[in-house]
Amino acid sequence: MSDAAAGELANYRDYLGEYRKMFSRKLEDLAPGELARRSVPPSNLSLLGLLRHLARVEHFWFQMALQGAPGPRLHDDDGDAGFAAITERDATQADVDEAFVAWREQVALADEWADRQTDADLATVVTFRDGTETASARDILVHMIEEYARHTGHADLLRECIDGRTGE
Protein backbone atom coordinates (compact mmCIF):
# COMPACT_ATOMS: atom_id res chain seq x y z
CA MET A 1 0.00 0.00 0.00
CA SER A 2 1.01 3.62 -0.26
CA ASP A 3 3.48 5.47 1.92
CA ALA A 4 1.53 7.06 4.81
CA ALA A 5 3.55 10.23 4.31
CA ALA A 6 1.99 10.59 0.86
CA GLY A 7 -1.28 11.62 2.48
CA GLU A 8 -4.76 10.41 3.23
CA LEU A 9 -6.14 10.75 -0.29
CA ALA A 10 -3.18 8.87 -1.78
CA ASN A 11 -3.72 6.10 0.77
CA TYR A 12 -7.42 5.76 -0.08
CA ARG A 13 -6.69 5.80 -3.80
CA ASP A 14 -4.05 3.13 -3.40
CA TYR A 15 -6.38 0.79 -1.52
CA LEU A 16 -9.21 1.38 -3.98
CA GLY A 17 -6.90 0.86 -6.94
CA GLU A 18 -5.58 -2.41 -5.55
CA TYR A 19 -9.09 -3.75 -4.93
CA ARG A 20 -10.15 -2.76 -8.44
CA LYS A 21 -7.18 -4.71 -9.86
CA MET A 22 -7.93 -7.74 -7.67
CA PHE A 23 -11.56 -7.69 -8.73
CA SER A 24 -10.63 -7.46 -12.41
CA ARG A 25 -8.27 -10.44 -12.10
CA LYS A 26 -11.14 -12.58 -10.79
CA LEU A 27 -12.91 -12.14 -14.15
CA GLU A 28 -9.97 -13.04 -16.41
CA ASP A 29 -10.10 -15.87 -18.95
CA LEU A 30 -13.77 -16.77 -18.58
CA ALA A 31 -16.37 -17.18 -21.31
CA PRO A 32 -19.55 -15.05 -21.25
CA GLY A 33 -21.66 -17.92 -19.92
CA GLU A 34 -19.18 -18.54 -17.11
CA LEU A 35 -19.13 -14.85 -16.18
CA ALA A 36 -22.94 -14.83 -16.09
CA ARG A 37 -23.27 -18.12 -14.18
CA ARG A 38 -25.11 -17.82 -10.90
CA SER A 39 -22.82 -20.06 -8.97
CA VAL A 40 -24.51 -19.99 -5.59
CA PRO A 41 -28.23 -20.74 -6.12
CA PRO A 42 -30.70 -19.31 -5.40
CA SER A 43 -28.72 -16.04 -5.43
CA ASN A 44 -28.71 -13.78 -8.53
CA LEU A 45 -25.01 -13.16 -7.96
CA SER A 46 -22.67 -13.71 -10.91
CA LEU A 47 -19.30 -12.29 -11.85
CA LEU A 48 -20.88 -10.37 -14.73
CA GLY A 49 -23.55 -9.08 -12.37
CA LEU A 50 -20.86 -7.93 -9.92
CA LEU A 51 -19.06 -6.12 -12.75
CA ARG A 52 -22.25 -4.34 -13.75
CA HIS A 53 -23.02 -3.54 -10.11
CA LEU A 54 -19.58 -2.06 -9.48
CA ALA A 55 -19.88 0.13 -12.59
CA ARG A 56 -23.22 1.28 -11.20
CA VAL A 57 -21.72 1.98 -7.77
CA GLU A 58 -18.78 3.91 -9.27
CA HIS A 59 -21.24 5.95 -11.33
CA PHE A 60 -23.54 6.73 -8.43
CA TRP A 61 -20.94 7.71 -5.86
CA PHE A 62 -18.40 9.53 -8.03
CA GLN A 63 -20.66 11.07 -10.67
CA MET A 64 -24.04 11.54 -9.04
CA ALA A 65 -23.25 11.96 -5.33
CA LEU A 66 -19.86 13.70 -5.42
CA GLN A 67 -20.36 15.73 -8.60
CA GLY A 68 -24.12 16.12 -8.79
CA ALA A 69 -24.50 14.58 -12.25
CA PRO A 70 -28.17 14.23 -13.17
CA GLY A 71 -29.92 11.35 -14.78
CA PRO A 72 -30.80 7.76 -14.16
CA ARG A 73 -28.38 5.44 -12.43
CA LEU A 74 -26.24 3.23 -14.61
CA HIS A 75 -27.56 -0.34 -15.04
CA ASP A 76 -30.88 0.58 -13.54
CA ASP A 77 -32.63 -1.70 -16.03
CA ASP A 78 -32.89 -4.90 -14.06
CA GLY A 79 -34.42 -3.79 -10.76
CA ASP A 80 -31.58 -5.58 -8.96
CA ALA A 81 -28.76 -3.01 -8.82
CA GLY A 82 -27.09 -4.42 -11.94
CA PHE A 83 -26.80 -7.97 -10.63
CA ALA A 84 -29.50 -9.90 -12.46
CA ALA A 85 -29.91 -8.61 -16.01
CA ILE A 86 -27.97 -11.29 -17.86
CA THR A 87 -28.03 -15.05 -17.30
CA GLU A 88 -25.56 -17.67 -18.44
CA ARG A 89 -28.05 -18.87 -21.05
CA ASP A 90 -28.17 -15.56 -22.89
CA ALA A 91 -24.81 -13.93 -22.10
CA THR A 92 -22.87 -12.87 -25.17
CA GLN A 93 -19.39 -11.50 -25.69
CA ALA A 94 -21.05 -8.18 -26.52
CA ASP A 95 -22.68 -8.17 -23.05
CA VAL A 96 -19.30 -8.82 -21.45
CA ASP A 97 -17.56 -6.17 -23.54
CA GLU A 98 -20.26 -3.63 -22.78
CA ALA A 99 -20.02 -4.31 -19.04
CA PHE A 100 -16.22 -3.97 -19.05
CA VAL A 101 -16.37 -0.75 -21.09
CA ALA A 102 -18.91 0.77 -18.68
CA TRP A 103 -16.90 -0.26 -15.62
CA ARG A 104 -13.59 0.99 -17.01
CA GLU A 105 -15.22 4.26 -18.06
CA GLN A 106 -16.64 4.81 -14.59
CA VAL A 107 -13.30 3.96 -12.94
CA ALA A 108 -11.54 6.45 -15.24
CA LEU A 109 -14.10 9.16 -14.44
CA ALA A 110 -13.72 8.48 -10.72
CA ASP A 111 -9.94 8.72 -11.04
CA GLU A 112 -10.30 12.01 -12.93
CA TRP A 113 -12.36 13.34 -10.02
CA ALA A 114 -9.77 12.11 -7.51
CA ASP A 115 -6.96 13.72 -9.54
CA ARG A 116 -8.54 17.11 -8.82
CA GLN A 117 -8.80 16.54 -5.05
CA THR A 118 -6.48 17.17 -2.13
CA ASP A 119 -6.46 15.79 1.41
CA ALA A 120 -8.30 18.94 2.51
CA ASP A 121 -11.09 18.23 0.01
CA LEU A 122 -11.92 14.96 1.75
CA ALA A 123 -13.87 16.88 4.38
CA THR A 124 -16.20 18.29 1.71
CA VAL A 125 -19.78 17.24 2.46
CA VAL A 126 -22.15 16.59 -0.41
CA THR A 127 -25.92 16.23 -0.38
CA PHE A 128 -27.43 13.57 -2.61
CA ARG A 129 -30.47 11.32 -3.11
CA ASP A 130 -32.77 14.26 -3.70
CA GLY A 131 -31.36 16.14 -0.72
CA THR A 132 -32.17 13.44 1.80
CA GLU A 133 -28.64 12.24 2.56
CA THR A 134 -25.21 13.74 3.11
CA ALA A 135 -21.69 12.34 3.29
CA SER A 136 -18.15 13.61 3.16
CA ALA A 137 -15.89 12.77 0.25
CA ARG A 138 -13.82 10.83 2.81
CA ASP A 139 -16.83 8.71 3.80
CA ILE A 140 -17.59 7.96 0.15
CA LEU A 141 -14.01 6.88 -0.60
CA VAL A 142 -13.97 4.62 2.46
CA HIS A 143 -17.34 3.21 1.39
CA MET A 144 -15.96 2.46 -2.08
CA ILE A 145 -13.02 0.57 -0.56
CA GLU A 146 -15.51 -1.37 1.56
CA GLU A 147 -17.69 -2.05 -1.50
CA TYR A 148 -14.78 -3.46 -3.49
CA ALA A 149 -13.44 -5.48 -0.55
CA ARG A 150 -16.82 -7.14 -0.03
CA HIS A 151 -17.48 -7.83 -3.70
CA THR A 152 -13.94 -9.01 -4.42
CA GLY A 153 -14.53 -11.64 -1.74
CA HIS A 154 -17.78 -12.59 -3.45
CA ALA A 155 -15.95 -12.77 -6.78
CA ASP A 156 -13.33 -15.07 -5.31
CA LEU A 157 -16.00 -17.52 -4.15
CA LEU A 158 -17.90 -17.33 -7.44
CA ARG A 159 -14.72 -17.92 -9.43
CA GLU A 160 -13.85 -20.94 -7.30
CA CYS A 161 -17.31 -22.41 -8.05
CA ILE A 162 -16.73 -21.94 -11.79
CA ASP A 163 -13.26 -23.38 -12.28
CA GLY A 164 -11.64 -23.90 -8.90
CA ARG A 165 -9.33 -20.89 -9.20
CA THR A 166 -8.65 -19.18 -5.88
CA GLY A 167 -6.27 -16.56 -4.65
CA GLU A 168 -5.74 -13.16 -3.14
Image (cartoon, rainbow, N blue to C red):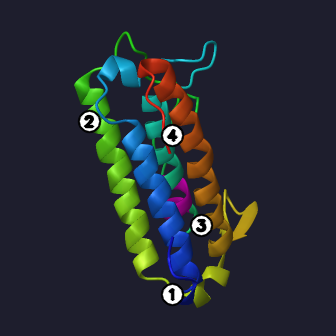
Image spot of residue 48 (x, y percent): 42, 30
Q: How many marks?
A: 4
Tell me if residue 94 comes above or below residue 62 in the rendering.
above
Q: Residue at x 54, y 54 (%)?
A: 60
- Mark-to-mark CA distance, 1 and 3: 16 Å
Residue nearest the viewer, comparing 55 with 11: 11
Q: Which mark is residue 97?
A: 2
**Pointer 1: what residue?**
6
Magenta stretch? 59-64
Alpha carbon distance from label 4 to label 3: 17 Å
Q: Residues within 10 Å of mark 3 (few under 14, many from 20)?
A: many
Is residue 60 a member of the stretch shown in magenta? Answer: yes
Q: CA distance from mark 4 to mark 1?
A: 31 Å
Residue type indicated by callout 4:
His
Residue at image mark 4: 53
Please name the residue shown 24% across and 26% down the image.
Answer: 93
Choose between 3 and 104: the one closer to the eye.
3
Please report whichever mark, 2 or 3, sits nearer to the chain's N-terminal start. 2
